[in-house]
Image: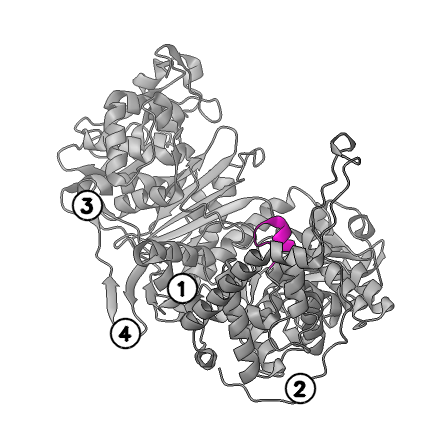
Amino acid sequence: MDYEPLPEAPGPPPLSEAAPRGALRVRRPPSLRRPSEPRPRRSIFGHFWRWAWVYALGLGAGSGLVVAAVIHMPEVDKIDDFRPGLVTELYDRHGGPYANYALERRVMLRQGQVPRLLQSAIVAVEDEHFFQHGGVDLAGILRAAISNFRAGHITQGASTLTMQVAENVFHTRGRSWRRKVEEALLAVEIEKRYSKQQIITLYCNVIYTGNGNYGMSAAATDYFNKPVSRLTLAEAATLAGLPQRPNEYNPYRNPQAVIRRRNHVLDRMLAEKIIDRAAHDDAVAEPLLLAQHHRTPEESGGTYFAEEVRRYLEQHYGSQRLYGAGLRVQTTLDPKMQVAAEEAMRKHLVTLDHRRGWRGPLVHLDRGDPEGQELPSWRRGEPVAVGEWHEGVVLAVEPDSAEVRIADQRFTLERAGIAWTRKQRVSDALKRGDVAWFRLEAPPKDAKPGTPPRLMLEQEPRIEGVILVLDSASGAVRAMLGGWDFERSKFNRATQAQRQVGSAFKPFVYGAAIEQGYTPADTLFDAPTAFIGADSKLSYFPQNYYHRYAGMITLRRALEQSVNIPAVKMLDMVGVRRVIDFARRTGITSPLPPYPSLALGSADLIPMELAAAYAAIANSGLYMQPYFVEQVATSDGEVLETHSPQARKAMDAPAAYVLTHMLEGVIDHGTAFALSKLDLDIAGKTGTTNDYTDAWFVGYTPKLTILTWVGYDVKRNLGNGMTGAAAALPPWQAFLERGLAEGWVTKGERFQPPGGVTMQAVEYYTGLLPPPGGSSYLRLQQEAFVTGTEPSRPWEGSYSSVRDLPWYQQRAFYLPKEGERMP
C-alpha cells in the first residue's frame, strides 16, 4: 500500500498511569492466619541470590524468544504489497453483476481520510501513548506482565496500535510469548518505516469491526449508513470500541453491551481531555440509532438467491477459494423476474399485515429535540423516492395530521395515510418523537396534474412469504424470495422450511390414478365416509371444506373444486404406496406418511421440492433437478464447472398432459378462477391447511413453474378465510400480470398435447359422452384422455344415478327439467 508521508499530527496529552485492573487478591481467612509466627527478615542481596537462577533462566528464555522471533519475522516491507483477498462475483443469466462475496468486507481509506474525532477515540481507548512510543509501550508491558504473572498465564497482551497492525497484516495472532515478541519487533520496524498517520490509517483499514466488516469505513457504512467523515462523537466512540471484542460487541445483536463500551470510550476521551464534559454528556445520552438496511427489491438483488449460491460454492470449492480466489459465477437469476417476484410478494405481505392493525412506532426519541435528530438510514441530498420506504421522525402531531421529517424534507401525514391502522385520529397512532416507516404513494392516474404524492404510514409485516420461479424445461431457478427480508432473517423458507401443503398435494393422488387407468371423466361418490387411520382403526373422518357433499362427481370436478372426500377415496382405491411412488418420481424427497390424510396434504414438504415436482408435470413428465449455477470460472477465465442437466423420467408424457388438462380446470372454473382472465394457458392448484396456518398456490404456464407460500415461521392462524386462493394466489397473479405487461411472459402460450392423447367431448357433470345428435341443454367439456381410455357410454338423458341418492346428497346438483339447459 503506497502511503505519502504527511506532517505528524500532534498526539493527545499523556494519560496518568492507571492502577492495574483485574488483579485477584485472596485474603487468608482469620482461622488460617498465624500472627504468632514472625516473618524472617531477608536482605535485598539475599533475596537476589536466592532467586538468581530464576532471573537467569527468565533472561535466557527471553533472549531465546527474541532470537527465534527475529529468525522467523516476516519482512516489514511487505506492508506496501498488502492487498485484501479477491472478491467472488455473481452474475445473472444476462451477464450483469448483482452480488459478490469476500471474507473481508472492507472499504479502504487513504491517508488523511481518517477524521480526527475517530482517530482520537481510537487512541484514547486502545493506545493512550500512541504518539509517544516507538511501537512498544513499556509501561503497558509492565502492567500486563504483572497481571500475567499473577494469573499464571497470558491474560493481557499490552498490544499497541502498531502491534495490532502487525498482528492483522502478518497474521501473528496468538497468546504465546513468542508471538508477542514477534509483534513487538515488527511494531518497532513498522514505526521506523512509516509515520504515525500512515500507521493509524492502516489500523483503520485492517482491524475487524464485527458483522463481517473489516476496517472503520465498512463499519460506518454497515452500522450507520454514512462515511467516516460524517460520524458524530457518539458514533465514532462506538466504532472505536468494537475491535476489542467484535463478536460480542455486535450492535445488532447486543446493543446494550455496545452502549456500555461506547460510554467507556467517551469516559477515556474525557479523561484525556479530548472532549469536555458537555460534549461527553450529550454523547452518552444519544441513543444507538442503527441503519435498518431496508432495501427496495431493486437494491436487494436477490439476497436469498445469492446466499443459496454462496452455500453451493462453499460446499464445492471451500471457504478459502470462495472468499479469496475471485471466482466468476454465472447464475440462473433473471433480474426482471426477481424484481417482479419480490415486489409482488412484499406488497401482498404488507396488505395482509395491515389487516392485523397498527403495532406502534419503531422507536420513540425521548431525549433532545426531534428536529435535530439524524437517522442512519437517511441519505442527505437525495430526493425521497416515491414508492420506497423511508424512516421518518414525527415532529408535530394534530388530531387529523402530523408533520414528518425524512432526511432534508418535510411531509404531512393525513388521516388517509393511516386509514389501515383502524385509528380514528392521527394523534391516536403517532406522537412527537416517534420514528416509523413511511412511504410516498403516487397520486392515482385520474388525479389532477400537479397533485402531490400522499404520505402513507407503514410497518414491517411479521408474516413471511415465499415465491419461486423455475424454468420447467431446464430446472433453472429464475427468481427466489425466501422471506420478507434477508437482513431480518437469513432462514430461506424456499429451500429450508418444511410446511404442510394441504390440497396442493392432490395432483399427485390424481396423477397416480391416471397412471392406473383412471380418467378425468370417471366418477366417485362424494359423501361422509370413515377410513382406517394411523391407529389401524376406523377413526379418520375427513370433511369437505364447506361441509357440503356433491354425491356422484367426476375426478375433474373433484380436483377443480378441491373436494376432499373423493381425493381420500382415490388414494384408497389406487393405493397409498403407488401415490407415494408417484410423488417420489416427481421429486418429492421429504417423508410421506402412508395414511389416508396424505391425500389432503398432511405431509410437510419443502417449497423447492414441491415446485420442482409440479415442473415435472409441466415438462411432459420429465423431472429436472433445480439448479442455481450455470458456470464457475477463475478470475483469469479458466472454466472450473459448467452445469450438466440432471433429468429423469417421472411419468409418461400423455399422463402428464391429462393431469395438466385437469389442473387447467382449477383456473377455468375452480378455486383459482381469478387467473382465468389472463391470456395464456395456466394450470395449478391451491393449498390450504385446516387451521389456516399455511396458504399455497403452485401453478405453471407452458414455460414457467411458479410457487407462492404465505405463513408465519411459528405456525399461527393467518385469519379466517385465508385459503390458498385468498392468501397465496394474489402475489402469483401480480407476478404473472407484470410478466405479460413487460413481455417476459408471452401472451397466448398454450399447452400442446403430445402423442398418445385423445381429446373427446364429454358431459361435464357425468363424464359421459353426449347423446347421438347432441343436445343443446348439456354442458360439454373437451376432455383429455390417454388414448384407449376414452368413455364409451353416452349420456342417456337421465341423472338416475344422482336422483337415487338420499336428498341431502343432491343439494350440490341442479337437476334440470326436460328441455332446460344445464348451468
Residue 605 falls left or right of residue 362: left
Residue 427 falls left or right of residue 586: right
> Given contact means CB atoms under 8 Å apart, are the residues at marks 2 and 1 in contact?
no
415 lies above or below 766: below
User: Which label lies toward us, 2 or 1?
Assistant: 2
The answer for how far apart the CA atoms under marks 1 and 4 are is: 17 Å
Q: Earlier in the sequence, mark 2 or mark 3?
A: 2
Q: Amino acid at mark 2?
A: Glu
Question: Which residue is depicted at the point 79% across and 52% down?
Answer: 430
Question: Which residue is depicted at the point 28% across and 41% down?
Answer: 587
The mark found on residue 323 in the picture is 1
Q: Amino acid at mark 4?
A: Gly
The answer for how far apart the CA atoms under marks 2 and 1 are is: 36 Å
Element under disc 3: strand
Stretch in magenta:
147-156
User: Which label lies toward us, 3 or 4?
Assistant: 4
Q: Position of residue 93 (x, y in %)?
A: 34, 66
Q: Position of residue 185 (x, y in %)?
A: 52, 73
Reading the image, the residue beneath label 4 is 637
Q: Amino acid at mark 1?
A: Tyr
> Given contact means CB atoms under 8 Å apart, are the residues at marks 4 and 2 in contact?
no
> Given contact means CB atoms under 8 Å apart, are the residues at marks 2 and 3 in contact?
no
For the residue carrying disc 3, how many other residues have a C-alpha within 10 Å: few (<14), some (14-19), or many (20+)? Answer: some
Query: Is 445 contained in the magenta span?
Result: no
Q: Amino acid at mark 3?
A: Arg
Q: Earlier in the sequence, mark 4 or mark 2?
A: 2
Element under disc 1: helix
Reading the image, the residue beneath label 2 is 8
For the residue carrying disc 4, how many other residues have a C-alpha within 10 Å: few (<14), some (14-19), or many (20+)? Answer: few
